[in-house]
Structure formats: structure tokens, C-alpha cells
Image: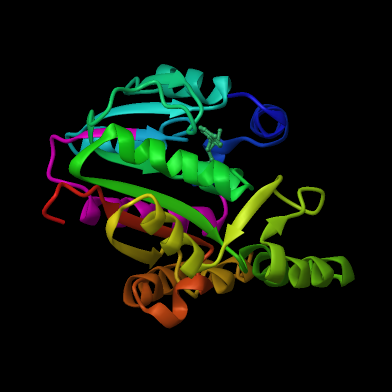
Amino acid sequence: MADSSTSLIVDYYTVRHQEALRLQSRPSGRLEWQRTCELLDGLLPAAPARILDVGGADGAYARHLVAAGHQVRLLDLVPAHVAQARSGVPAIDADVADARALPEPDDAYDATLLLGPLYHLVDRGDRMTALAEAVRVTRPGGLVVAAAISRFAGPLHFAATRRWSESIAREARALLTDGRNDGRIGFTVAYFHRVEELVDELHTVGLAGVAVQGIEGPGWTAAEAAVGAPDAETVFHDALDLARVYGSEPALLAASAHLLAAGVVPDGTT
Ligand SMILES: C[S@@+](CC[C@H](N)C(=O)[O-])C[C@H]1O[C@@H](n2cnc3c(N)ncnc32)[C@H](O)[C@@H]1O
């Protein structure tokens, strides 16, 4: 299923960006890591569950889930990520695959994670295909968990890190209407969701009981702005507390940099 977006993504993660460092370096990444682990622990079935981690990169979350007693298989579009997942400790069962065409049988998993592919798939049709594939490989009654980047995250990050400019203001206005990140300004070609769009996408593939949580909470920009300040760690921990308090507060969901949506595959009773 390789297309022009595939080569852009593989190039971005192979040549321009080191994903393995992202969740441990900046405060936004550390918040994302800690909160995603907490939220997954609260959402996923009791261990041992069969979990498919689609877009799992080098295996950071897969290793967290293996440590919790789950049986995890990882798929990712980028060969270098799959190599890192296989060669880390513990080694993760991993293969190269596209979220839009999963090489897995129907109903094979208790839960499927899509923590990344949705924001790299700019066309709604491609996102729906990836979500439908996640539903297909997850057993009835099982869970699909999908991450998205909030529509406002990019411009908020530029402002918090003192990089605001005329061109960022133009990009912020354009994002309001099309949600398409301009990869020349930052990150890569990507789609940034509104909360209601993400909910609609999960409903459209038939998932039930869809709920969205904010991952980093509304204090992540304060933690980013505090980098280098003597009290940066205090601000980080305050932001983490804020995320825990307001993570499910509807009015503040879109203030997080990432959204985490979960829905249940219908089993005839849901
Ligand atoms: C920002 S990283 C997120 C990694 C990790 N899941 C996390 O949440 O930190 C996005 C990942 O999704 C992968 N990805 C993007 N599009 C994909 C697709 N269509 N199929 C499979 N993986 C994809 C990328 O290669 C990358 O490893």
C-alpha cells in the first residue's frame, strides 16, 4: 500500500528525526509518555491480553505493556523503527506493515493501539481504512485505542517556546480550517484533529462507547516554556497533576497536544 505519503514518513523518521529520544527529552514528550502509560493501564484489559501496537515505533509502549504482563506484537511503516523494536530489551515481536493493510487475521487481538498512524494519514479515507483494519483484527468486545494530535498543538508549541512569527500566525489560521500541518514549518506532513472529528471517525467504523481523553493536559505549554528555568521540574510536575485532574474535562480536551480515543468493537450486546 506504499504511496507518496509512505516515502515522506519513512524519510522523516529515518533521516530527519529520532523517535526513540522523543518521549524522554522535552517536557511535552515526558508528559505524553507518563500520561499515555497511565491511560493505557486504565483502559486495557487485565494482563495477559493480546495487544497489537500499530505505529509502535521503537517499542517504548510495547515494552511498558510487556512489563505489565501483556503479549504484544508491533507493526510500523518504518524499517528502522522495527529494527529498534526487535533489538531492544526485551525484544519485541515486530514487523514492517502499513496501518491501512494489516497482515493479521480477523479477531486476533484483545486490543489494538493506533498511537501515531492517524496523524500521519492526512486523507480521511486513509484514516478510516486504518481504523477499520484495527476493528477487523480486534475481537468482538475488544478495544481500539487511537491517538491524534490536537488541532491547536503546533501553534501553541511555537508560542510556548518563543518561536511565534507572522508565518506561524498564518499557519495557525490555515490549520483552523483544513487541519493539515505544513511540514515545511515543523514536524512533517500531518493531520491535526478536532475532538469531535476524532469521535466521529471512531463512531463511523462502528466502535461503541467512544471516549476521548487529553494526554498532556492544559499545562504542557507552561512546562515547555519553563525549560531552562530553575523551577522547570516543579512546573513539569504541576502540569502532570493538571493533566490528571482535567484529562477527561470536555472543555479542556483540545488544550492537550495529543488526544487519546478509545472504543469497543461491538459484540452484539454493545
Ligand atoms: C510519532 S510516532 C509515535 C510512536 C509511538 N506509537 C508513540 O505514540 O510514541 C508515529 C509512528 O507511526 C508510524 N506510522 C505512521 N504512519 C503509519 C502507517 N500508515 N502504518 C504504520 N505505521 C505508521 C511511524 O512510522 C511512527 O513510528
Q: Which residues are magenta?
A: 24-52
Q: Residue at x 39, y 71 (%)?
A: 243
Left or right, 158 with respect to 211, comes to right
Q: Position of residue 208 (x, y in %)?
A: 26, 58
Q: Position of residue 245 (x, y in %)?
A: 33, 77
As drawn, which residue projects farthest toward the bottom?
251
Left or right, 195 with respect to 139, comes to right
What is the number of callouts on the image? 0
Q: Quadrant of the C terminus?
A: bottom left
Q: Position of residue 265 (x, y in %)?
A: 24, 47
Q: Position of residue 133 (x, y in %)?
A: 39, 35
Compared to residue 93, the image places residue 164 above or below, namely: below
As drawn, which residue projects farthest toward the front?
268
Check residue 116 for magenta coloring: no
Q: Give the colouring mode of the picture.
A: rainbow
Q: Residue at x 50, y 55 (%)?
A: 148
**Nearer the observer, 179 or 84:** 179
Check residue 26 for magenta coloring: yes
Q: Residue at x 55, y 57 (%)?
A: 149
Left or right, 259 with respect to 120, comes to left
Q: Is residue 35 visible?
A: no
Which quadrant of the figure has residue 49? top left
